[in-house]
Image (cartoon, rainbow, N blue to C red):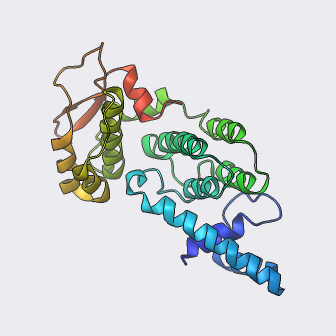
Amino acid sequence: MSTEALRFAATLKEAEAPSRPLGEEASVDGLRSKGATGAGIRDVASWLLRVVRACDTVVANKRINAVTRISQARLLAVAIHLRDDLKPSQLQTLLARWEKVSFRIYGMLGHDARTRVGEYVRLAWQVVNEEPPPSAIDAAVGEIGDEFPIVDAANARRNANCYDGWESELRYFMYRYEEYLAQTQKQNFRNEQWEVVVSGTGRAALAAGFDGLRVPSKPDPGGVNLVIFRKSSRGPVITLVNADALEVLGKD
């Protein structure tokens, strides 16, 4: 079991909603206090197993590495996965909202783990302990992202160097682009090459991704073209060209 799974398990079992994930020592003490009896030990063991499985599910998805690099974002995703009462369609909807909001804040705008940590952690606790309906969870995730509109996030990347220092996010963006094209063309998206790209690191993976993109040299205002890749002294640059790009990149 990872230290993070231990910390998440203890954080989500606090008596009141915390403002940040518990540290390792506090987590051990908290869970130990709940396992003072035989029944308590079994309950804690069962809970730890559930959390470990949810953590494994979140971190195993290499496609969303650019979204899950922040601890509190991972915690909220784990909390959503722990809701066994959710239908598959509800789970998918909530995770899609979480993904878009989190990528806007931490991927496109580049905020670090200090940003909205309390909001993420408290919501994760509420998802598990208060069991709000899916509509309430969806609204709460949306509220976290209200101060980070997609227009600001897109402008933060417009004409920026999206190659150096932004490799993971760029791989995620390109993968999402291909998914979007497949959806608009009513095709199934399954590409082993892209699985390698999102699982890789550095320039080699990005080079493979560029080869897979179908991006025109000129924007088509009436179509679904999302970006123009062009060379510059700083490397390839992404330029957003129409409103469809905003939807793909994280518009709620």
Q: Is residue 179 left or right of residue 214?
A: right
Q: Is residue 139 left or right of residue 187?
A: right
> Which residue corresponds to the image point at 65% horizontal and 74% vertical from the top-left?
48
Task: State which quarter of the image contains the N terminus.
Answer: bottom right
Nearer to us in this view, 220 or 92: 92
Where residue 116 appears, as percent x and y from the top left, is: 62, 48
Q: Splitting the image into 4 quarters, where does residue 10 fall?
A: bottom right
Q: Is residue 31 visible?
A: no
Q: Is residue 31 left or right of residue 196?
A: right
Nearer to us in this view, 12 or 158: 12
Nearer to us in this view, 13 or 72: 13
> Which residue corresponds to the image point at 46% horizontal and 40% vertical from the top-left?
109
Q: Splitting the image into 4 quarters, where does residue 252 fall?
A: top right
Where residue 140 appears, as percent x and y from the top left, is: 68, 39
Where residue 202 appears, as percent x and y from the top left, is: 24, 57
> Which residue corresponds to the image point at 75% horizontal and 76% vertical from the top-left?
43
